[in-house]
Amino acid sequence: MNIFPLIGLGVSTQNSSGNSLDVRYHLILNKNEEFLNTLDIEHPGYDAIDGLLNETQNSEELKEILKPTLPLGERQKLVIHKIEDDGAVSNICDAYLKLYLLSLTVSEPNSLNLDGIFNALPNVAWTNHGPVDPKEIDKFRSEHGEVAVKSVDKFPCMTDYIIPSGVRIADSSRVRLGAHLSEGTTIMHEGFVNFNAGTLGAAMIEGRISAGVVIGKNSDLGGGCSTMGTLSGGNEVKISVGEDCLLGANSGLGIPLGDRCIVEAGLYLTAGSRVEIIDSNGESVETVKASSLSGKDDLLFIRNSLQGTIQCKPNKKSVVLNESLHKND
């Protein structure tokens, strides 16, 4: 589904040099749909806003008209930004608009062009007073008293900008803006979700969902488990977990899984792992690289506790989530 072009209306916090540190969007819309309107802003519609944006003088008049509807604080300015198409990220307004689309679950992970996003985002001290330039934190403290710095990062916590409906997050510092969390998702304290990653349905997350990784509905990531991302380290394969899957505690995954698969606790399965295939009769059939099993359904991966070999057997068990844990209303 092509949702572009898009227009976003929001507020940007600036440093002392007038450079943007973030963008908090309050209105996002295209020609056919309004995706976000946090303050019930009355506006003339996409075409009217687009027409005014194309005329510099009228654009400034539009900003003056809209200013009273938005809470502009110290160090803040009004932003009206348009993205024509899904090109590479060229500035902070592009970056935040696309991160919003992901966390609003308008766009699924890996569906947007995020090339250039790291260069477009500044490093920011995220404080209890909002975003601050790390180089100016000491001066900021002298002016505002006690300042708690939650993190120093290019990406803020998702919940400081968006709280998706029907989700539960035990430690919000471990979910970045740009995470895609479907309704019914529960993120426990050890869970982590990067930007451009997340769940496609109700899921229990007690492990790490790296950038680019998607988890199918009714799947369970056990405590401390890990999924390999593609941001660094040379891995180019997008890792995904199918529906009704289980990654055991402290396990790791380096291949895409199909539906109804289980990786036992403590087993790290990489693409190059040598895996012994065991048939339904318990007989060894062949030994293959784990990558050749990518995307296949109904597999159980275990480590033979006597021989130390990784084995793959037909999975006859079903993974069932506790429904009461995922009614996040």
Image (cartoon, grey):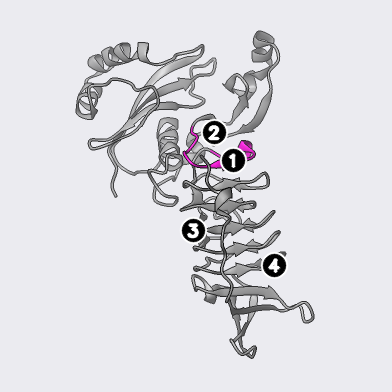
- N-terminal of the pair, mark 2 or mark 1, is 2
Q: Is residue 223 left or right of residue 1?
A: right
Q: CA distance from mark 2 to mark 3?
A: 22 Å
Magenta highlight range:
162-176
* Helix, strand or loop under label 4: loop
**Is disc 3 in contact with disc 1, using a CB cutoff of under 8 Å?**
no
**Is disc 4 in contact with disc 2, using a CB cutoff of under 8 Å?**
no
Task: Say what amino acid the circle numbered 2 marks.
Answer: Thr
Residue matched to label 2 = 159
* Helix, strand or loop under label 2: helix
Instruction: Answer with the quarter of the image where residue 122 lies.
Output: top right
> Mark 4, residues whose alpha carbon is within 10 Å: few (<14), some, or many (≥20)?
some
Q: Is residue 252 left or right of residue 49?
A: right
52, above or below 122, in the image: above
* Helix, strand or loop under label 3: loop
* Helix, strand or loop under label 1: strand
36, above or below 139, in the image: below
Magenta stretch: residue 242 in it? no
Residue matched to label 4 = 267
Residue matched to label 3 = 216
Q: Residue at x 52, y 55 (%)?
A: 213
Q: Residue at x 68, y 62 (%)?
A: 251
Q: Position of residue 324 (x, y in %)?
A: 57, 49
Q: Position of residue 37 (x, y in %)?
A: 36, 28
Given residues 321 and 133, the one toward you in this image is 321
Q: CA distance from mark 3 to mark 4?
A: 20 Å
**Is disc 2 in contact with disc 1, using a CB cutoff of under 8 Å?**
yes
**Is disc 2 in contact with disc 3, using a CB cutoff of under 8 Å?**
no
